[in-house]
Image (cartoon, rainbow, N blue to C red):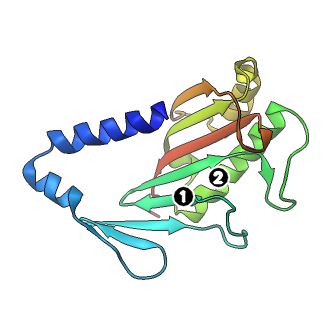
Amino acid sequence: MKTLILAIACTFVLVASSSPSVRAQTAETTAAAAGGTQKIGTTQRRVVRLPGSPPSSVPLSPAIVAGEFVFASGQIGFDPKTGQMVAGGTAEQAEQVLLNLKAVLEASGSSLAHVLKTTVFLADMNDFNAMNEVYRRHFKEDPPARTTVQVARLPANARIEIEAIALVSHR
């Protein structure tokens, strides 16, 4: 809840501090045609779905592409082939989480190399080092900005969840 309030507050500050034309453009929202695309001002908003994945049982999109940015929902350690949480502890789940995040980013037209910021949610901060070992293998050079927090509980009793903001790749 605090994160949501902070995000809303930051958006309000950004919009309130913008010029009148930016405020008007930001407020202008137009629903668009089928395919999960909406036009917001002059920016397209596209919902990303993973090919072959079943629809989510919760109301969320795997990722949203808006302009040059990809906003990837939090990923947990579900193996997409089995639909089950991977066996093992935090390290094994972290590996699967990052593979899942990579798949979502690639479906969005991005990659791990284009990640700007991640937020890592841990069920236990004592797993910080185990997570870092795996994370370091996936973000070898110039890792993205990152926040890591301990939370009371994660979906499906996961040990780790990671969300990301990335740039769309221009190939």
Query: Which one is closest to the eye, mark 1 or mark 2?
Result: 1
Mark 1 / mark 2, whichever is N-terminal: 1
The kind of residue tagged 2 is: Lys
Spot occupied by residue 84 in the image (x, y as percentages of width and height)? 86, 53
Residue 57 vs 11, above or below: the answer is below
Residue visible at 54% across and 58% down in the picture: 63
Residue visible at 77% across and 45% down in the picture: 77
Classify mark 2: residues with Cα within 10 Å, few (<14), some (14-19) or many (20+).
many
Q: Is residue 66 left or right of residue 1?
A: left
Separation of disc 1 and disc 2 at Cα? 12 Å
Residue 80 vs 162, above or below: the answer is below
Residue 63's mark?
1
Residue visible at 57% across and 50% down in the picture: 73
Q: Quadrant of residue 163?
A: top right
Residue at numbered disc 2: 102
Residue 122 vs 96, above or below: the answer is above
**SS of the residue at dot 1?**
strand
Q: Is residue 169 left or right of residue 139?
A: left
Residue 1's mark?
none
Q: Residue furthest bottom?
A: 33
Q: Residue furthest left?
A: 20
Spot occupied by residue 15 in the image (x, y as percentages of width and height)? 21, 45
Total marks shown come to 2
